[in-house]
Amino acid sequence: MKSFNIVAGVVSSILTVAAVTTAASAVNAPAASAAPGGFLVTADVPTLTDLHDQVVYLIETPGVSDEAKAANMEGGMGAVPVADALYNTGLFRAPYGSNEITGPETQDGDIHTAMLRTKSVGRPDITARVVWKRIDGVWKLANSSVCEGIQAVGLSMSCNF
């Protein structure tokens, strides 16, 4: 009976620590992590690093859910197949390629622009102006830029989102 009480005490202690840890994590979690998109750019003026990280999140990061991608794109779920296609080609991530968001930047209210420079083995480098729109407090990759990207890399996909 004594060993049963010891085991019960240990299990009780473990459950208490787990409950306290879970509650503390929920209270201390950053707002962006708690959002349905997991990663969101919400600063009033996004930095080049913010925008670059968003592009990496969309086309270089494995395991990102469709909902998380949609939360970062003006076209929402309709634009997700484009991000998926770019990820699946592997052209713009190591070891075959890379991308970088650079200046010059402009911002006019809820519209922000910067330059995307991509490199991919066996293909010409691409430099394009990219547009983000702030929608409900979140900077999202604009449909116009997603559509230009489809054309620039020669994907045979429609752009009706």
Image: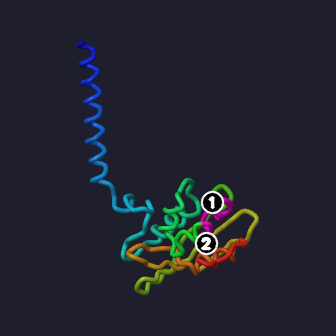
Q: Which residue is mark 2?
A: 117
Comparing 105 with 40, the one in front is 40
Q: Which residue is mark 1?
A: 93
- Tell me what residue is drawn at x 27 percent, y 25 percent: 10
Provide residue 16's location: percent of width, then percent of height: 25, 36
Please say if the residues under marks 2 and 1 sit with CB atoms less than 8 Å apart: no
Q: Is 133 positioned to the left or the right of 31 in the image? A: right
Rendered view: 99 above or below 143: above
View extreme (front): residue:
1
Q: Is 2 positioned to the left or the right of 90 in the image? A: left
Task: Considering the whole magenta stretch, tell me its main secondary structure.
Answer: helix
Which SS class for mark 2? strand
Q: Quadrant of the C terminus?
A: bottom right
How many neighbours does mark 1 have within 10 angstroms: few (below 14), some (14-19), or many (20 or more)? some
Comparing 21 with 111, the one in front is 21
Q: Which residues are magenta?
A: 81-93
Asked whether residue 58 is drawn in magenta, I would say no
Q: Which mark is residue 81?
A: none
View extreme (right): residue:
122
Provide residue 73's location: percent of width, then percent of height: 51, 72
- Tell me what residue is drawn at x 58 percent, y 74 percent: 116
Q: Which amino acid, by three-letter code, is at mark 2? A: Arg
Say which label, 2 or 1, has the lower sequence index: 1
